[in-house]
Amino acid sequence: MGILEDIKASVAKSGQSRDGIFGVKGGDKKRVRFLNDISDGQKIVFHDKWEARNAPCGKMFGDKCALHNAEGYRTRDQYAWTIWNYEEKKIQIFLFNAGRVSPVPALVQMHETYGTLRDRDYVISRTGTALDTVYTVVPMDKKKFKLDKKALKKKKLFEMIQNAFDSASDPIEDDEDEDDDSDEWGEDEDIEEDDYDDEDDDEEDDD
Ligand SMILES: [Zn+2]
């Protein structure tokens, strides 16, 4: 339903952080751990327009997209990874484009240096505003991640993005049989055990 209305509402509250999506305010910094590696990120198509909040393309979620050919809107890719946010003590989605005002280019360099993003924490800080925003990415010492937190499955990741940006729209129709009774994991309120990606973790040894 009315994605345009939704975007207008979003403009009105712009500056607020979005549920489940990583954000850092100007002058602030956050320590994070990437739970999937750079190549395991998901591409998310967004539409944006000057002075309007951006919104993910409805077609990403099987819906029609009101903004697909809307006047004045551009289409740009963003990329999404799962992170653990130490300050907020929760799983979040690290969602950015790969442009100039983004921590992603620096993270790509870190990945080239270390061969992975997952062997250490990163401190992401932000200075400036709007087009003068600068993200700085500082790698911490190599250290095994001790918490039992895993990357989100694609389906859950998409669902969280949809909810964060277009809360007025209906949830995704779900044909698959899923048990909704699985235990939740502590502080990650809306994330269930089933929502985590199990397919990795080759490095389980403790040292
Ligand atoms: Zn679209």
Image: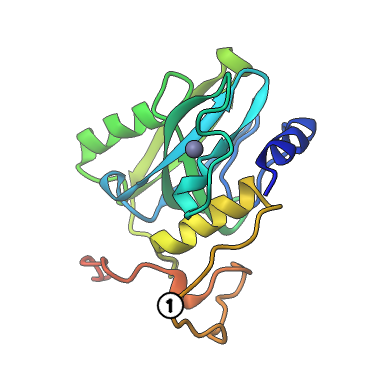
- Can you give x and y, in whole percent of width and height, for residue 51 in the image? 67, 19
Rendered position, 2 above or below 89: above
Specify whether 89 is left or right of 174: right
Image quadrant assignment for residue 176: bottom left
Q: Which image quarter is the C terminus in?
A: bottom left
Residue 190 seen in the figure: yes
Rendered position, 73 above or below 68: above
Residue nearer the viewer, 20 or 148: 20
Disc 1 on helix, strand or loop? loop
Residue at the limit of the structure toward the top, as seen here: 132
- Can you give x and y, in whole percent of width and height, for residue 142 in the image? 31, 48
Which amino acid, mark 1?
A: Glu
**Snapshot colouring:** rainbow
Specify whether 104 is left or right of 164: left
- Can you give x and y, in whole percent of width and height, for residue 66 in the image? 58, 38
Q: How many labels does the image show?
A: 1
Rendered position, 39 above or below 29: below
Specify whether 150 is left or right of 133: left
- Can you give x and y, in whole percent of width and height, for residue 65 in the image? 54, 42
Rendered position, 127 above or below 113: above
Residue at image mark 1: 176
Residue nearer the viewer, 21 or 71: 71
At 39% from the left and 31% from the top, the residue drawn is 104
Residue nearer the viewer, 106 or 13: 13
At 47% from the left and 47% from the top, the residue drawn is 59
At 48% from the left and 44% from the top, the residue drawn is 94
Residue 86 seen in the figure: no
Image quadrant assignment for residue 203: bottom left
At 52% from the left and 74% from the top, the residue drawn is 192
Q: How crowded is mark 1: few (under 14 residues within 10 Å), some or many (20 or more)?
A: few
Question: Is the shortest distance between ligand 1 and the CB of mark 1 under 8 Å?
Answer: no
